[in-house]
Image (cartoon, rainbow, N blue to C red):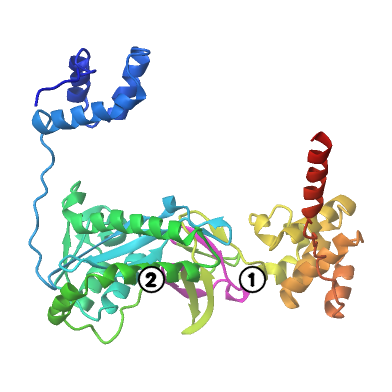
Amino acid sequence: MERTRKDPFEEVWSEIRDYLEANPGIEGTTIFSYLQRKYPGKFSDGQLRTLQRKIKIWRALEGPGKEVIFPQEHKPGQLSESDFTDMSKLSITIAGQHFKHLLYHFVMTYSNWEHGTLCFSESYESLSEGLQNALREPGGVPVEHQTDRLSAAVHKVGHPDEYTRDYNRLLKHYGLRGRKTQAGKANENGDIEQRHFRFKKAVDQALMLRGSREFSSRNEYRAFLDQLFQQLNAGRQSRLIEELKVLRGLPARRLNDCKRQRVKVGPSSTIHVQHNVYSVPSRLIREWVDVKIYAEYIEIWYAQKHIETLPGLKGEYRHAIEYRHVIDWLVRKPGAFENYRYHADMFPTSRFRMAYDYLKKKRPTRADKEYLEILYLASKESQTGVDEALRFLFDQERDISSEAVEEIVRHDQVVPAITEVVIDTINLSAYDELLSEREVFHG
């Protein structure tokens, strides 16, 4: 059948082709917008589809060759791959706060069975926890495990060709043979890279169906991800069964997911762990303590006794100072408070900060001593009770002092609850009547 309609792009096709040859990835919509700007009134919006079809045909007949995917032959129980992937762009919020996090993502390449563990850094601790979680879910171990060189987690600093001692120990514990991709060849970890893309797309779609990206707690979010993994893995059961038949058995116990460090407590009642500063109880000053470093927290041990568990800091050169560790001595040395390096950590809630600012304004010479006595009371009695007492004093516009707070806290004075503001439901029928009257008047 002969062409009956003139090609509207015939006159400018050589110009279009130049753009396509210079930039094979340029989109038809981009070229069409350019043509409409350069030739006002020549091309109508309805001609976009015509241009897109013309470009599609040109690319198939004359365009550059496309990347060829070479299918790989996978054997049951032979290979697993893992990597970290950033989940922050999914805009998850927990209790109203943006939840910036990673996922340690594991896949068995024959069945595409996958597993994930939430984490916050590409550390050995995160890898160890995630890998062990993934192996224990199906209850077996494949022959090989491949990473994309994960230098921060599995390689010695300054020796990129060597696995770290801890990672080697982890592989040996599970009888895994470690493989790594070549430098700059992330595509060699192709299965897990594809799973990253598809999994995050599935998460995004599940969130849209859910109607909200807000979760009340990390546990609720984790349960959401676990359910999604179950749904995704449901269609892989037949091939997974083949894998399970040849997977080797698990060792009787997990390998500790932690690093160990022995450090001395300094005179400021602090320790340095992985370039971060943590406070510990002052009675440990000048003693050596053992620190177990997990993916999300650290444990302090002394004389084989567990002293305390502290949330792990993300990143380096940060600090976490617990006022209860130092207040006993700070209250005896109030003059050290104003210029204390960790001054900002001594305000557990915003009301404590408000109380200090109030005292600095009303009684500047005694403010530090007065505030530290309030903080000392919180450490010995109840931080929540002191916070509520401060709220009451502010609400009643009463003077803030350690004596006033102590009177409320130690004598169990009932603090009135925050007044609940109730807005009555608006009755819209009155507006309907008003509109009806207006229509009658103008009718």
Residue at 37% across / 13% down in the picture?
41
- The x and y percentages for residue 34 are 33, 19
Q: Quadrant of the N terminus?
A: top left
Residue 281 sits above or below residue 346 on the image: below
* Left or right placement of residue 208 versus residue 250 in this view: right
Residue 16 sits above or below residue 289 on the image: above
Say which amino acid is labelled 1: His
Magenta extent? 274-296
* Left or right placement of residue 47 versus residue 244 in this view: right
* Left or right placement of residue 318 versus residue 160 in this view: right
What is the quadrant of residue 438 in the picture? Answer: top right
Residue at 79% across / 59% down in the picture?
423
Return the mark for residue 226. 2
- Looking at this view, is 168 or 15 the one in front? 15
Count of numbered circles in the view: 2
Say which amino acid is labelled 2: Asp
**Hey, which residue is sitting farthest bottom in the picture?**
252
Return the mark for residue 325. 1
Q: CA distance from mark 1 to mark 2?
A: 38 Å
Q: Is residue 292 magenta?
A: yes
Residue at 27% across / 57% down in the picture?
150
Determine whether the residue tagged by mark 1 lies in a helix, strand or loop: helix
